Image (spheres, rainbow, N blue to C red):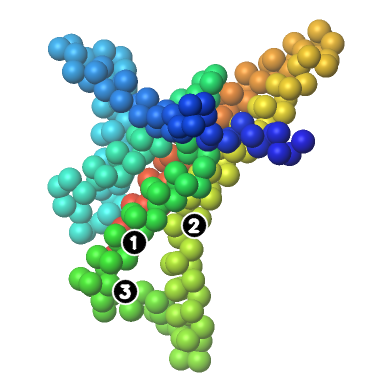
Amino acid sequence: MMTNLFSIFDPASSFSLPLNWLSTSLGLLFLPYSYWVLPNRFTVLFNLITSTLHKEFKVLLGADYKKGHTFIFITLFVFIMFNNLLGLLPYVFTSTSHLSMTLTLALPLWLSFMFFGWINHTKHMLAHLVPLGTPGALMPFMVLIETISNVIRPGTLAVRLAANMIAGHLLLVLLGNQGPNVSSSILTLLIITQILLLTLESAVAVIQSYVFAVLATLYSSEV
């Protein structure tokens, strides 16, 4: 049963080609809205979200902020959010529920921060391994703990996003499969529950993309 349950996340498709991964580019369909002569409601909302994120990420980056530094994190937020939300539509493949997708986003970002930090700010990176006020006897252990916590960061970023996407989709599928087997009165309750869960999943899709972008910003501010 579990094999059949998780088969909804299987990226295989017909014609022996993984065409469903093309769903990651569906967000490009919304770009033409930004080229209207007069801004519509979507453009106004999108500009409001990006400007708010820009102000928040600028604060998180601190004194080292320079013009344009927030663009990569805003782009990351928008890309993940579109993929999460589009995955809630029927017959749309959720690419962000796979570690192959989330690790592709997290690992290069983390590696670039690490290379930049160790090459340009070596003393700062070494000092970061031992928090201020650590007793001399505990310093080797603190270096080990800080190194491990640093290494697992891309994994935690990737697993957090994928696990949250999988959990919500599995719950929706489990409840949806019970529809043909219940009475009409319970079916009404089931539909209401599904609508509430879909609303919750929409919120989770936005929150998880925000958490991913904020953590990436915090990791970059450390180097």
Residue 147 figure quarter: bottom left
Left or right, residue 29 beside residue 71: right
Please provide percent x and percent y for residue 87.
50, 28
Secondary structure category for the residue under label 1:
helix
Q: Considering the image in quadrants, where does the N terminus appear?
A: top right
First reached walking from the N terminus: tag 2 or tag 1: 1
Residue situated in front as seen by the camera: 109 or 188:
109
Residue 136 seen by the camera: yes
Circles 2 and 3: CB atoms closer than 8 Å: no
Left or right, residue 222 beside residue 195: left
Left or right, residue 215 beside residue 45: right
Which label belongs to residue 83?
none
First reached walking from the N terminus: tag 1 or tag 3: 1
Farthest residue, direction bottom: 137
- Judge the density around disc 1: few (<14), some (14-19), many (≥20) Cα neighbours within 10 Å: few
Please provide percent x and percent y for residue 4.
71, 34
Q: CA distance from mark 1 to mark 3?
A: 14 Å
User: Disc 1 marks which residue?
Assistant: 111
Q: Considering the image in quadrants, where does the C terminus appear?
A: bottom left
Q: Residue at x 45, y 73 (%)?
A: 146
Residue 166 figure quarter: top right
User: Disc 3 marks which residue?
Assistant: 125
Please provide percent x and percent y for residue 19.
44, 29
User: Disc 2 marks which residue?
Assistant: 155
